[in-house]
Image (cartoon, coloured by chain):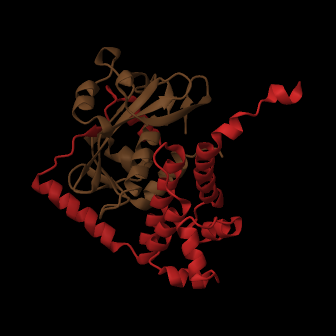
Amino acid sequence: MKIYNVKKEIAVNCEIVVLQKHLIPKKKNGWSFNWSKAFKEKPKTIYALKEEQTNNIHGLIQLIKDDGMLIMELIELAPFNIGSKKLFENVAGCLIAFGCRESLKLNTDYKGYLTFVSKTTLVELYRTKYYATQTIGTRMYIDPNSAELLISKYLKDEK
Amino acid sequence: MKNNKDTLSQLTNGILTESMDIGTKEYEDFKLLIRSKVSEASKDERIKIALLGLRFHMEDYLKSKSKTIEVGNFIKQFVQLIEVKQVEFAKYLSIRPSNLSKILNGERRLTIELALILEKLSNIDARLWLRIQNKNEIKRIQKISSKSINKYRLKELIN
């Protein structure tokens, strides 16, 4: 999968891996969430979008299961990938598409549905850019058809 | 699109979600809603989703170092997912049920022709079916013939 360097206008190869201790991003480097704590509590639920050549972490996603349903509990973009001066495009898309892919691997009654609670200000973005559906409050889901679209858009690997 | 970009450039931190309120009444209602969406899917849609999930399991297996899963096992899963009996499947392919059984149990190789038929039926690339078979065979032969293979040296051959 690829993310795009906005300034240099080049694509960079990335992969999504289960977060390992030496890759945990720190608050002192501008990250907002305490990933060390989350890693201690549920290590195998966190995945990192990592640049293949540099090992730089561009974003993290935590996926948890409840009663067979997959929940995108947390997603955070690296501090250098937010705001008007962000360096890379497509980071959120790759992470969300990865969550969708995991939901399609479930063998439960919720197969293919990725669920999450959006920040109020981002509901419209999730709806238009990631084809999510808003339900009760800001709880949202991405259905299997939308999941397939996102996977083919963001996770495509060259053969 | 302009609005999406504005929303993202206004982010003050990289966190894009709120935590799911597992255990609340609203959360249970949300789960019910997702289940009702799942149950609305037609048989064709259900099978399409299941096959997408199978493809992702196969892709992950190819990259993993986990213990061997025979390609026949994935074919078995395919037959189960499309809700067809093995005898019917063999009949449809115009092969003897005993021969199909041998392929499913790894006693007979998956042919390129059958891989192409599987691609047509499942939308899972013929190369993926065959690469799984190759991966397993390479692993097996490396194990039993490593001594006889390791004796070969390019230097020996060209000097």
A130 left or right of A134?
right
A33 and A125: which one is in front?
A33
Question: Which residue is painted at 42% across and 77% down in the image?
Answer: B43
Judged from this view, the residue extending furthest toward the top is A28
B122 left or right of A37?
right
Judged from this view, the residue extending furthest toward the right is B159
> In the rendered image of this protein, does residue B6 appear above or below residue A27?
below
B37 left or right of B55?
left
B69 and A56: which one is in front?
B69
B35 and B65: which one is in front?
B65
Question: Which residue is painted at 58% across and 44% down in the image?
Answer: B143
- Counting labels gives 0
> In the rendered image of this protein, does residue B87 appear above or below residue A22?
below
Residue A55, position in %: x, y?
Answer: 49, 24
Question: Which residue is painted at 43% across and 51% down in the image?
Answer: A101
Residue B82, position in %: x, y?
Answer: 47, 74
Identify by letter the chain in brown.
Answer: A
Residue B89, position in %: x, y?
Answer: 55, 80
> Chain B in the picture: what colour?
red
Which quarter of the rendered picture does the C terminus of chain B lie within?
A: top right
Question: Which residue is painted at 26% across and 57% down in the image?
Answer: A68
Q: Quadrant of residue B154?
A: top right
